[in-house]
């Protein structure tokens, strides 16, 4: 850890005015041994939970001046990449929960991990981590069953399907050799029966739903549903702060939330 109270983890938070940025700042204020020493936001720069918010355009300069132990990012793909570059230049580890990266954007994000520790997770809920393990086990135990993945989120969410749904799909396709990204069917319409090799993907946007993910497995005799519902964003903020504490003293490299949970 860098300067400041010994034992205090000094955090930078991007997207400070966003739903998750606010949640992270508030959760850090409630946590012993954590302090938000830098917060930035693109448009709104009113203080959040008593923490001053600087313009996003000043992030690189402020990072060099403040030298936090770790940065936590929940924004959008373009800004997350810019923040990752700044973190790499300033030698500051980065935790990002941002979703919606294209393949090229993800590769660019991974480049930063050659200079600093970068931990990316589409979902920082421990319940979702458990859901993913349960899904892998169920899919392995039920070869040939139809698989449909449905996610539901608030009406302000930009990316679809959710990052978590994409992660679950990759898990399913990893376990089931007969399923691949080519077989993904997003929503259904028209007149055709379901083909073997398809995996249905459904994204719903409504009201203020925090985040729900459901995996349906079925053959002609039985149905298994595995569902996770996030009650509030506090679970994501708590996981991100756990990840920040875990990442701060790591070597440069690419990490996931599973590394934190496994305690490796
Ligand atoms: N991994 C996880 O556990 C979770 C991940 N997420 C993900 O986190 C991200 C943010 O979600 P949420 O907080 O709900 O979104 P919000 O829209 O509420 O907030 C996004 C924040 O990012 C900022 N931002 C967006 N684009 C840019 C940009 N180009 N440059 C600078 N700042 C930018 C916004 O600034 P401005 O207000 O000025 O536009 C805002 O502060 C999403 O990708 C979401 O999927 C969300 C919840 C949990
Ligand atoms: O945008 C959100 O809100 C969320 N995004 C993440 C995702 O895309 O999976 C995680 C969570 O479901 C909330």
Image (cartoon, grey):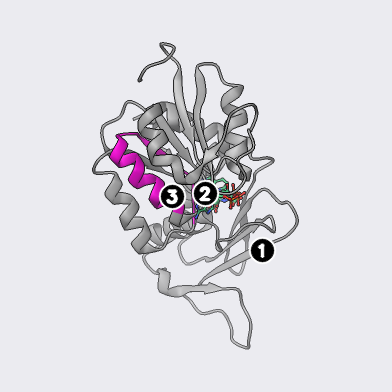
| Count of labels in the image | 3
- Check the image and name the residue furthest to the left: 114
* Relative vertical location of residue 90 with respect to residue 102 in this rendering, above or below: above
**Residue 256 in view, yes or no:** no
Q: Residue 260 placed where, x, y %?
A: 41, 33
Distance (Cα) linking label 2 and label 3: 6 Å
| Residues shaded magenta | 79-99
- Residue 80 marker: 3
- The residue identified by callout 1 is 204
Q: Is mark 1 within 8 Å of ligand 2?
A: no
Considering every residue shown, the one lying at the far bottom of the view is 191
Q: Residue at x 46, y 28 (%)?
A: 11
Q: Is mark 3 within 8 Å of ligand 1?
A: yes
Q: Quadrant of the N terminus?
A: top left
Q: Is residue 135 above or below residue 115?
A: below
Say if the magenta span includes residue 85.
yes
Q: Residues within 10 Å of mark 2 (few under 14, many from 20)?
A: many
Q: Residue 240 vs residue 91: left or right?
A: right
Sequence-earlier tag: 3 or 1: 3
- Vertical placement of residue 149 versus 112, above or below: below
Q: Quadrant of the C terminus?
A: top left
The answer to whether residue 171 is visible is yes
Tell me the element at label 3: helix
Gap between marks 1 and 2 measured at Cα: 21 Å
Image location (x, y in percent) of residue 178: 39, 69
| Numbered disc 1: secondary structure | strand
**Marking on residue 75:** 2
The CA distance from mark 3 to mark 1 is 25 Å
Q: For the residues carrying marks 3 and 1, which lies nearer the camera in this image?
A: 3
């Amino acid at each position: 850890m860098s300067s400041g109270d010994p034992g205090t983890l000094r955090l930078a938070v991007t997207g400070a005015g966003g739903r998750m940025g606010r949640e992270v700042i508030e959760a850090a204020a409630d946590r012993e041994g954590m302090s938000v020493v830098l917060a930035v936001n693109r448009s709104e720069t009113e203080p959040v939970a008593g923490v001053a918010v600087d313009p996003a355009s000043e992030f690189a300069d402020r990072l060099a001046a403040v030298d936090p132990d770790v940065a936590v990012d929940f924004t959008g793909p373009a800004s997350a990449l810019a923040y990752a570059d700044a973190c790499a230049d300033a030698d500051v580890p980065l935790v990002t929960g941002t979703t919606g990266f294209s393949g090229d954007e993800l590769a660019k994000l991974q480049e930063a991990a050659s200079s600093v520790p970068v931990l990316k997770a589409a979902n920082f809920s421990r319940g979702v981590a458990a859901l993913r393990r349960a899904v892998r086990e169920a899919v392995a135990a039920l070869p040939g069953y139809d698989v449909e993945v449905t996610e539901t989120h608030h009406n302000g969410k930009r990316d679809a399907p959710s990052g978590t749904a994409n992660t679950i799909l990759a898990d399913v396709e990893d376990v089931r050799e007969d399923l691949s990204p080519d077989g993904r069917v997003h929503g259904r319409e028209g007149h055709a029966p379901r083909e073997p090799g398809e995996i249905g993907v459904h994204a719903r946007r409504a009201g203020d739903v925090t985040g729900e993910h459901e995996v349906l497995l079925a053959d002609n005799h039985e149905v298994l549903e595995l569902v996770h519902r996030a009650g509030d964003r506090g679970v994501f903020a708590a996981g991100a702060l756990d990840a920040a504490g875990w990442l701060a003293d790591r070597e440069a490299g690419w990490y996931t939330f599973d590394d934190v949970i496994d305690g490796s």
